[in-house]
């Protein structure tokens, strides 16, 4: 895995996130076809979004959106704040219990652009930002985007050959999952085809990880935890009441979601029933009200219970921003 210490358009986040994340580690361990557009950024990655539309990502090349992706201003500076667009990238969060790292979504803010698919992939290639302490990427440093085209519901992403350098099959599957989930956050993109240095590829890596005619989210679930929260994002805001969405593959499709305050106290807890489980992936979408006296950094935690003795298993959690009810 590689990390990046620089990224130009990080969403502002309190420095306390890093400290909270470190505390969370201990807490969790203790619990043990014509070219088209890609549409608005969804709030729920497991279904078509119902949120108000964000700018549609037009297909693009580096020349078409280089200024926006590189951070260069597209207009002369003014006293009023520049318009921005929120996008997601998908990174890896280590398992505090010592298991495999798993995919998590992170919100990034970029200068306003219609080419949001291009902006999202470029943000992904930049790696973790300084305020995303503890998160990792499996994409090699130096990987660059050469262009994206969208034909029907398939995005063809052209990257430099560096993308497949180094690492075994687990690393290849991980970086492919990062790319697939980042590109398919847009509701009109269902799958990703890959080109390297302008040439279509059927597999990547020395062990031949198949990419073929296109890879969708369900083909990349090997990089997900059993309970994958896709909203809210890592370090993102949880409105009050808060909506929690994602995918799960757990015993009898049932698990628990909790909201914890800055001291680790449980503010709210709700049972969740996914649309499928016990060997299949199902979606979930639950709204949880909680009480907090002031805005603060808290924790969103999910876990299953052991059918053997009822103890928490598959425990995952990450920092979120909490707010009092309106």
Image (spheres, rainbow, N blue to C red):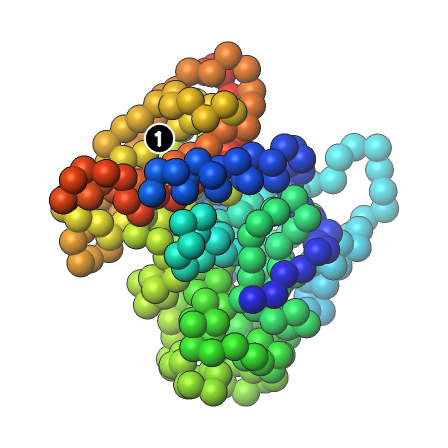
Q: Is residue 71 left or right of residue 47?
A: right
Is 57 or 7 nearer to us in this picture? 7
Q: What residue appears at the point 27 percent right and 49 percent down from the top-left corner?
A: 248
Give the residue pinned by disc 1: 258
Q: Is residue 226 visible?
A: yes
Is 73 or 97 nearer to us in this picture? 97
Residue 60 percent coordinates (x, y): 61, 67
Residue 58, placed above or below residue 326: below
Which quarter shows the N terminus?
bottom right
Q: Is residue 143 left or right of residue 302?
A: right
Q: How many marks?
A: 1
Q: What residue appears at the point 56 percent right and 61 percent down from the top-left corner?
A: 137
Q: Is residue 149 visible?
A: no
Q: What residue appears at the point 39 percent right and 67 percent down from the top-left corner?
A: 191
In the image as oriented, which residue stretches furthest toward the top? 293
Residue 17, placed above or below residue 180: above
Residue 118 percent coordinates (x, y): 60, 62
Which of the 4 quarters of the picture holds residue 4?
Answer: bottom right
Residue 305 percent coordinates (x, y): 22, 40
Residue 257 percent coordinates (x, y): 32, 34
Residue 201, placed above or below residue 234: below
Dot 1: within a 10 Å radius of its alpha carbon, few (fewer than 14), some, or many (20 or more) residues?
A: some
């Amino acid at each position: 895995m590689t990390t990046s210490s620089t990224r130009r358009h990080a969403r502002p986040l309190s420095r306390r996130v890093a400290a909270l994340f470190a505390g969370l580690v201990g807490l969790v361990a203790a619990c043990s076809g014509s070219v088209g557009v890609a549409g608005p950024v969804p709030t729920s990655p497991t279904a078509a979004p119902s949120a108000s539309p964000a700018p549609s990502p037009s297909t693009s090349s580096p020349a078409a959106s280089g200024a926006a992706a590189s951070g260069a201003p597209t207009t002369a500076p003014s006293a009023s704040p520049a318009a921005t667009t929120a996008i997601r990238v998908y990174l890896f969060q280590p398992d505090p219990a010592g298991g495999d790292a798993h995919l998590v979504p992170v919100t990034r803010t970029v200068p306003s652009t219609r080419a949001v698919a291009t902006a999202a992939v470029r943000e992904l290639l930049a790696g973790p930002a300084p305020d995303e302490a503890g998160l990792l990427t499996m994409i090699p440093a130096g990987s660059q985007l050469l262009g994206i085209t969208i034909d029907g519901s398939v995005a063809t992403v052209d990257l430099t050959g560096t993308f497949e350098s180094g690492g075994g099959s687990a690393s290849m599957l991980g970086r492919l999952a990062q790319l697939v989930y980042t590109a398919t956050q847009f509701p009109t993109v269902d799958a990703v085809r890959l080109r390297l240095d302008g040439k279509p590829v059927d597999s990547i890596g020395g062990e031949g990880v198949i990419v073929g005619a296109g890879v969708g989210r369900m083909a990349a679930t090997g990089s997900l935890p059993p309970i994958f929260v896709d909203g809210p994002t890592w370090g993102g805001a949880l409105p009050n009441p808060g909506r929690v969405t994602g995918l799960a593959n757990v015993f009898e499709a049932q698990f628990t979601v909790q909201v914890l305050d800055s001291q680790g106290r449980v503010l709210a807890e709700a049972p969740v029933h996914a649309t499928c489980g016990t060997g299949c992936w199902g979606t979930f979408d639950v709204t949880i009200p909680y009480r907090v006296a002031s805005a603060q950094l808290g924790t969103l935690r999910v876990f299953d219970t052991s059918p053997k003795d009822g103890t928490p298993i598959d425990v995952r959690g990450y920092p979120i921003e909490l707010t009092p009810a309106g």
